[in-house]
Image (spheres, helix red, strand yellow):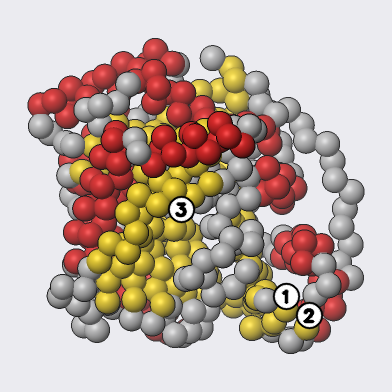
Amino acid sequence: MKTQQNISHFKQKALHWANQFEVCCFLDSNHYEDAYSAYDFIIAAGTEHELTCTTGDAFEQLKSFYTAHKQWVFGFFSYDLKNEIEELDSNNADHLAFPDLFFFAPKHLIAYKNGKAEVLIGTKSILAEIESFPLQAENQPKTINISQRLSKNQYINKVQALRDHIIRGDIYEVNFCQEFFAENAMINPVQTFEWLNQVSPTPFAGYFKIHHQYILSATPERFLCKRGTKLTSQPIKGTARRSSDPIEDEAIKLQLKNDIKEQTENVMIVDLVRHDLTKSAVRGSVTVDELFGIYSFPQVHQMISTISCELNPEVHFIDAIKNAFPMGSMTGAPKVKAMKLIEQYEETKRGIYSGSFGCINPDGDFDFNVVIRSILYNASAKYLSFQVGGAITYQSDASLEYEECLLKASAILKVLSGSLVQ
């Protein structure tokens, strides 16, 4: 074990070192203190074993993969695994072509905690190799012209149509998203992630490279984690802007905390998550540990609730992930009907967006985020994409929902220096 004098410098070198491999995953808490996080950051590079699946029996294949190797594995779940869980389909355009599920057992694994770097897999000499790894001079970010899949009017019309479904009683709430994209986009993925992580440091940030495909994530949301026999989910519903004026900022935060509309959205998803966890829980163990917690990030304040349960020993932990997937904060209630309407009204296949990535350790503990506030990039196709959305309820104002989308996109637009092409 070795103490690093400069965490940010070591972290940067470790990321660039890992990026030379065809597959790597970097998970960063950005110094946010969290009772459930095992490390400040962790970085996996190179593959001993890989699993790539399409929807069908992906969760069962992951069970077999984990059982066969019983070591650290890193990977992601695409939103479209919903089609394996329920009678659903995904027919919208997909320009990124991520696998539905991908996991790998790493060749090298370094974890950082309490000022110390530790090699969990691989030789101790990796730390010296990282320390001496040469960093390339940063290029100035190129302006990427970002287009919207929907115009503002189209977005508003679709939100009104979804409100009609709510009025008819089809659903109570639905998470409706829109895509921002760039074709013929040329970016440096690792530097773009570093800029994003500087502009918007969040507790579940991550960089995932799988050959020519990249996830550059500044997500603030945890999907599900397991520590021992305890499962914990922390859905986000409720967003407000930040202000540079401390007094106004505190007032905005207080307004969010007491906003009935935001509380209504949040409690609907809390109920949905409670229901999902019940499928995997010891009877009577599902509890709401925190309701309507307000947490601040560089661009936004968020309303976050925490729900937990004891995992039923007869339920495999991967089945517990499946039972809660896709996450309620990105679907709606009732969940299946909401997902059908998402497919009907959205223009783009979600793929890895609103899916999840993270890791499972040799003891079966895991931590997975929600893929939001994330740039997705296919270097071969030169296609860059990010999506943003929000909860549509009876009380939703379509124009305000549109403005909230732009607020959520602000950090990414800043990083890409993008000018929106209407």
Query: Which residue is disc 2 drawn over?
Result: 3
Tell me which residue sits at (62%, 69%) in the image.
40
Tell me which residue sits at (39%, 12%) in the image.
153
Return the disc, 3 or 2, that comes first in the chain's sequence.
2
Q: CA distance from mark 3 to mark 2?
A: 29 Å
Residue flagged by tag 3: what amino acid is it? Glu
Return the disc, 3 or 1, that comes first in the chain's sequence.
1
Q: Is residue 210 visible?
A: no
Does the residue at mark 3 contact the one at mark 1 (Cβ under 8 Å)? no
276 or 190, nearer to the observer: 276
Q: Secondary structure at mark 2?
A: strand
Residue ranking furthest to the left:
168
Does the residue at mark 3 contact the one at mark 2 (Cβ under 8 Å)? no
Using a 10 Å C-alpha cutoff, classify the residue at mark 2 as few (fewer than 14 neighbours), some (14 to 19) or many (20 or more). Answer: few
Query: Which residue is disc 3 drawn over?
Result: 221
Q: CA distance from mark 1 to mark 2?
A: 6 Å
72 or 413, nearer to the observer: 413
Residue flagged by tag 1: what amino acid is it? Gly
Using a 10 Å C-alpha cutoff, classify the residue at mark 3 as few (fewer than 14 neighbours), some (14 to 19) or many (20 or more). Answer: many
Q: Nearer the viewer, mark 3 or mark 1?
A: 1
Does the residue at mark 1 contact the one at mark 2 (Cβ under 8 Å)? yes
Task: Please indicate whether residue 306 sits to the left or right of residue 94 in the image.
Answer: left
Tell me which residue sits at (28%, 35%) in the image.
260
Return the disc, 1 or 2, that comes first in the chain's sequence.
2
Query: Which residue is disc 1 drawn over?
Result: 115
Q: Secondary structure at mark 1?
A: loop
Residue 288's place in the image compared with 298, above or below, is below
| Quadrant in which the N terminus appears | bottom right
